[in-house]
Amino acid sequence: MCLAIPGKILHIDRSIPELTMAKVDFSGIVKNICIQWVDASEGDYILAHAGMAISVLNAKEAEETLEDLKKLTIDN
Amino acid sequence: MKYVDEYRNKEQVQSLVRAIRKIVTHPWHIMEICGGQTHSIARYRLEEMLPEKVKLLHGPGCPVCVTPIEIIDQALELAKRPDVILASFGDMMRVPGSREDLMQVKAHGADVRMMYSPLDAVELAGTEPDKEIVFFAIGFETTAPVHMMALKEAQRRGLTNFSLLTSLFTVPPAIEAILSDPECKVNGFLTAGHVCAVTGNKEYYRLAEKYKTPMVVTGFEPVDLLYGIYRCLLQLETGTYTVENTYKRAVPENGNPAARNLINEILEPCDQEWRGIGIIPNSGLQIRQTFDRYSSRTKFNFHPDKKDIVSECIAGKIMRGTKQTTDCPFFGTRCTPEHPFGAPMVSTEGVCAAYYKYR
């Protein structure tokens, strides 16, 4: 139920200040997602849940986690 | 897909399993709270990769499973009204009330619509001004603010024919109920990543400290889950108990303040019944009186007609981690996804349904 899927913002529509919408690409499927709660730009990846972006994926943190995982691979 | 494929990497899964095997010396029980994580664990058969000493217990974090029968009956009653269009996430369609489910009433002519987002139901309210649009607003802290966003949008558009039938739950009181149970077996928790993306991690520090239990914020892909399990086991083996975030790409420490503000503005905590478990104090969210014109419970009169069902289901014990699906004599025989006895067989994210599908 709390499924949230990463998608890439293609275009942002700020015409309604209370309801900032974006066209978001989910591996080829493009959907309108509300990005009112996140500070995001075109090209950013967001995590979408039930039509809302709940989080902007943090590229630096993702890189660091993958680095930590890589170290584990070397040690094991 | 970026941010997904890296976390389904086979070599990474194998090295994590080796790392886990290396550090485990004691028997441990780890509980994942979220039904989405339970589903992934079953789908990727992660339990079978773990050392025998490590057991996963599957918590109550599936709102489809724990929504009480009385609320399902309310949805069914509203759906049958000729003036109502009942909109719902697809997951709720097959969940049995005391007599029938939404799919059955739809087959008999009720106007029930499956939707991806409550915002789509607001659109519908705009195009169907002569109908009452009721959205079946189930969820945990991840979904609650999305429903409130829909309420705000209905308010902005001046729509008076939109309301929410809420069934909203919060995770920390459920963790507290599980840890306070004298029969509790859980040594460490994987907390639900997408709940924390909204709430942040603050409340979990209090729980980790009070119950001396590690809490690891964890994602949903197989590498995420094994990494969360690995970090939790490291804490258990070294006798530490704190909050650790292994899903930092999606979960900032402070969560999503805008979403949280919306919850606090419109909703207030309430005692809540969980199907299969019972009432957990302060574990629910209800619409505040100032917004009650958007609450279906205020807007409509109900005529409860609950049929008492004698249940042999051990769901409550399974979701508290004191029993497991495999302990149930009815699993897969008399209780199946087509004819579920209880909550965890109802939804695809319930542990019994996930075991039935993937084992």
Image (cartoon, rainbow, N blue to C red):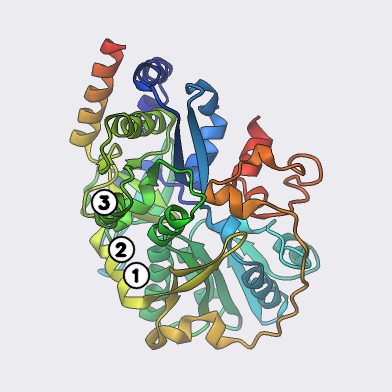
Q: Is residue B130 above or below residue B233?
A: below
Residue B57, position as x, y percentages in the image = 51, 40
Q: In screen coordinates, is B57 left or right of B215?
A: right
Q: In screen coordinates, is B89 left or right of B270?
A: right
Q: Which is more foreground, mark 3 or mark 1?
A: 3
Q: Earlier in the sequence, mark 3 or mark 2?
A: 3
Q: Chain of mark 3?
A: B
Quadrant of the drawing holding the C terminus of chain B = top right
Asked if residue A66 can be seen in this view, the reply is: yes
Viewer-closest of B296 and B216 = B216
Instruction: Please rate how many residues cluster around mark 3, counting C-alpha atoms within 10 Å: few if below 14, some from 14 to 19, many from 20.
Output: some
Residue at which label 3 appears: B209
- Tally of marks: 3
Q: Which is more foreground, mark 3 or mark 2?
A: 3
Residue A18, position as x, y percentages in the image = 28, 70
Disc 3 secondary structure class: helix
Q: Residue at x 51, y 23 (%)?
A: B52
Q: In screen coordinates, is B9 left or right of B163?
A: left
Q: Chain of mark 2?
A: B
Viewer-closest of B194 and A53 = B194
Residue at which label 2 appears: B259
Residue at which label 1 appears: B263
Tags 1 and 2 touching, CB below 8 Å: yes
Residue A20, position as x, y percentages in the image = 29, 62
Q: Quadrant of residue B250?
A: top left
Q: In screen coordinates, is A16 left or right of B115?
A: left
Q: Residue at x 27, y 54 (%)?
A: B200
Q: CA distance from mark 3 to mark 1?
A: 26 Å
Asked if residue B90 can be seen in this view, the reply is: no
